[in-house]
Amino acid sequence: MEKVKIKHDTYNDGFIQYGTIEIIRNEKMVKTGERIKEIGILPFSKMTIRDNDNIVADSLGYTINEKIKVPYRELPKNIKITINNGKEVFDIVKKDSSDRRNLYLYLQLVTNAKEEYND
């Protein structure tokens, strides 16, 4: 009898938290900050960003700061991601899945436009 190898993926680099941006206001309704209103959590594995990934990103006008693999699922549009409860917030600039078992997320660090223009 032939032994059947069961292949399963591991996601042992931590957890991502994903959700939408929620504006924080003080009692006078003045915006004091933003935070992510969490929708869900997924385990992930960090992946290597290939040269081809960077070439495609450059041609489409974005930067890939992180590439991760998570279990396949449909994710809502326009969500933000934090990694391991970190302070850095990422946008998903590309999603890829060839086997419907893993979902590869190409992440770009979100920058604050106000900080960019205060030179």
Image: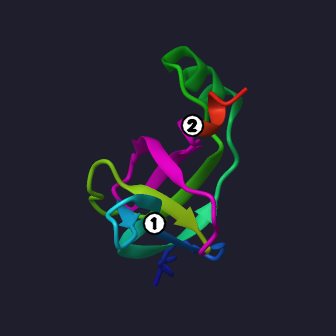
- Depicted 69 relative to depicted 38: above or below: above
Q: Is residue 105 magenta?
A: yes
- Pinpoint residue 100: horizontal percent, then vertical percent: 33, 56
In percent of width and height, residue 110 lies at 55, 45
Question: Which element carries disc 2, helix, strand or loop?
Answer: helix
Q: Earlier in the sequence, mark 1 or mark 2?
A: 1
> Which one is nearer the viewer's eye here, 54 or 40?
40
Frontmost of labels 1 and 2 is: 2
Q: What's the colour scheme? A: rainbow
Marker disc for residue 114 = 2
Q: Find the magenta span and give its range.
A: 85-113
- Say what amino acid the circle numbered 1 marks: Arg
Identify the image quadrant of residue 53: top right
Q: In the rendering, at what x and y percent does residue 26 appear? A: 40, 70
Q: Nearer the viewer, residue 65 or 68?
A: 65
- Residue at 65% in and 43% down: 65
Q: Position of residue 90 (x, y in %)?
A: 53, 51
Q: Quadrant of residue 85?
A: bottom right
Residue in the image at 67% along x and 31% along y = 118
Outermost residue on the bottom side: it is: 1
**94 relative position to 89: left or right:** left
Q: Is residue 6 visible?
A: yes
Residue found at x 55% / y 15%: 59
How packed is label 1: few (under 14 Cα within 10 Å), some, or many (20 or more)?
Answer: some
Q: Secondary structure at mark 1?
A: strand
Q: Which residue is mark 1?
A: 35
Residue at x 63% of width, y 65% of height:
87
Q: Is residue 20 visible?
A: no
What's the CA distance linking mark 1 and mark 2?
A: 17 Å
In the picture, the quarter occupied by the C terminus is top right
